[in-house]
Image (cartoon, rainbow, N blue to C red):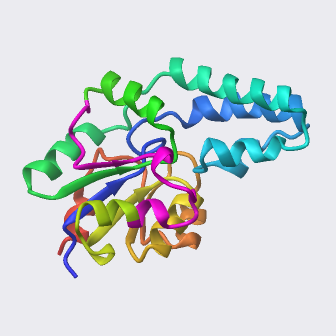
Amino acid sequence: MKISTILFDFDGVVADTEPQYDSYLEKLGMKYLGISDLAEQVKGATNETVLKHFSHLSPQERDNIEKGIEDFEKQMDFPPVKGVIEFIHYLKEKGYKVGLVTSSPQFKMDIALKKMNLVGIFDVEITADDITKGKPDPMCYLLGAERLNVSPSECLVLEDSLFGVQAGRSAGMRVIGLSTSVSAEKLKEKGAEKVIPDFADISFFEEIMK
């Protein structure tokens, strides 16, 4: 079926935030878990999933970690991935439906979209607040398609995480990977049909639409 809808993940796809998360989560993992690869383990997951890694701690400590993550997300920067703003407007001008499907909480997206001048640009916004099962479960992408009244087979997903690629593929959608935080090889192994570094060159999209 012809692609009518483009669904964007946020972190690592719209905003180049992964380096900030990597640094923050590395420190968090070292402090409480004695590991340095927490960011790699939870990339693309909801905050609720991240917090499960700290289930052995006291309720007070878990509350402190949760509040710390929320405070971090309220003050972080949201630099756009190269070419993404122009690409989103290009898609809108061409008549495609454009959705945002993210594991991030709604409060963060309210801040981020305002800072990036993207309020109201997406035809649907799915956040962690809308779902009960996070990526790699396909619930978020299936919900995005449902709210846009399109078939999953009409959707093209843009993802940078392994969990995200898996979620898109499990939803029955085509997936393009962005190598902003994970290697192209790993993204392809999970099912991304093509991997791009950013949106500076959108010829990849024209090739897919042929």
Which span is picked out in magenta?
118-142
Residue beneath the point at 50% across and 38% down = 105
Q: Residue furthest top?
A: 75
User: Is residue 125 one of those drawn in magenta?
Assistant: yes
Q: Is residue 142 above or below residue 9?
A: below
Residue beneath the point at 42% across and 50% down = 9
**Quadrant (top left/top right/bottom left/bottom right) for the N terminus:** bottom left
Q: Is residue 36 visible?
A: yes
**Quadrant (top left/top right/bottom left/bottom right) for the C terminus:** bottom left
Residue 66 percent location from the top left of the image: 70, 30
Residue beneath the point at 25% across and 32% down = 119
Residue 154 percent location from the top left of the image: 25, 73
Tell me where residue 152 sits by quadrant: bottom left
Residue 6 percent location from the top left of the image: 27, 59
Q: Residue furthest bottom?
A: 1
Most foreground residue, 200 or 152: 152
Residue beneath the point at 78% across and 44% down = 37
Report whether 26 appears left or right of 133.
right
Chief SS of the magenta region:
loop
User: Is residue 205 one of those drawn in magenta?
Assistant: no
